[in-house]
Image (cartoon, rainbow, N blue to C red):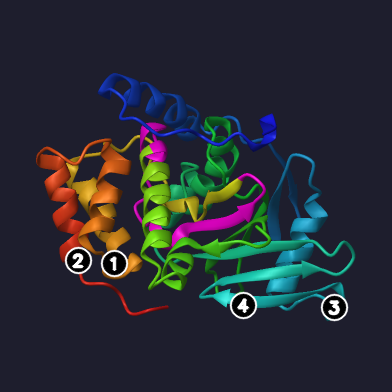
Amino acid sequence: MSAQCEQPGPVLPRSVAARLLAQARLSLPFYLGVGAPAVRRAYADCRVRAAAGREPELVRELLDLYRAMADPGAGSVETINFRCAVITVAESGERVFFKEFPRHHLLHDVERVLRCSRVDRAWRAAHLLPRVGIRTPRAVGAAFVRLDDGRAVEYLATEWVDGALPYHVRLRRVTGDREARVALLREFAGHLRLWHDRGVYLRDLVKNVLTRESECGLEFWLTDLDQLHPARRLTSGRLLHQMRQFARWAGPLAEEEANATVVSYLGDARGRMAGMIKEALLTTVPASPA
């Protein structure tokens, strides 16, 4: 297997000191706003920033397409969720994920002045997570617009992950194949441990994990990074909250599946925390299939 296909081995629990160090390495540049270079340009009605190697004109074109202010021949817009779309640029054929962040109250303006708005957090995370070995779509650009009625809106554009499938959708597709489900649960729990040990905590997790088949096996991608909190301490309550989210979208878990998840995350099925995680996995009411 080539170096390009190296996959992380079994994730073993790290010491508290090692986790805090990893958290500091991520959170310091994240909150100081360093390590996310941008080319900025102000237009008559908006301000944009483009990632290194990208052109501000592309970000403006994406914005105009999303707001239906551009010639339809410039590209197409496919809505995929509330305030989210995939934009295909006609000239290059590139597909870009585009998300809208409305700003409803004064706190949002304060966050923007302090450079910690949701778009700011997602922008920094898109640049910083790959540096700690976590896959996430690369940033393309961001835009800030003040509408005619005075409301401010921000937008974020990232590269589209071709061939990706949300984790919970992939898991539900193998319902009835116990061996395949157990393997997927183990992989996810191992990656969750890896993310936590590298200082990553996403408040809203499972629906924002994409999976993609590759020559190296199954890839896991984190998205929707405006919910990233790299300096947030991983308490037992927060861990159980994520496990309940996980169980909610994984569907009903059998005893064997819950045990496999616990062992993959903790390295052991014994102890108080193992019992709490297992109980959360087995007792959480699943969501309706999406």
Q: Which residue is mark 1?
A: 248
Contact check, label 4 and label 1, Cβ < 8 Å: no
Q: Which mark is residue 79?
A: 4
| Quadrant of the image containing the N terminus | top right
Is residue 244 depicted above or below 201 in this figure? below
Q: Looking at numbered disc 2 in the image, what kind of residue is underneath it?
A: Thr
Determine the secondary structure under disc 2: loop
In the orientation shown, which residue stands out farthest toward the right?
A: 91
What's the CA distance linking mark 3 and mark 2? 48 Å
Determine the secondary structure under disc 3: loop
Q: Which mark is residue 71?
A: 3
Q: Which residue is mark 2?
A: 284
Determine the secondary structure under disc 4: strand
Q: Looking at numbered disc 4 in the image, what kind of residue is underneath it?
A: Thr
In this orientation, which residue lies closer to the viewer: 179 or 232? 179
The part of the image, by quadrant, that contains residue 158 is: bottom right
Q: Which is nearer the N-term, disc 4 or disc 1?
A: 4
Q: Which mark is residue 229?
A: none
Residue 40 x, y percent position in the rendering: 72, 44
Instruction: Give the magenta-colored segment's residue range.
Output: 194-216
In this orientation, which residue lies closer to the viewer: 84 or 222? 222
Disc 4 versus disc 1: nearer the observer: 1
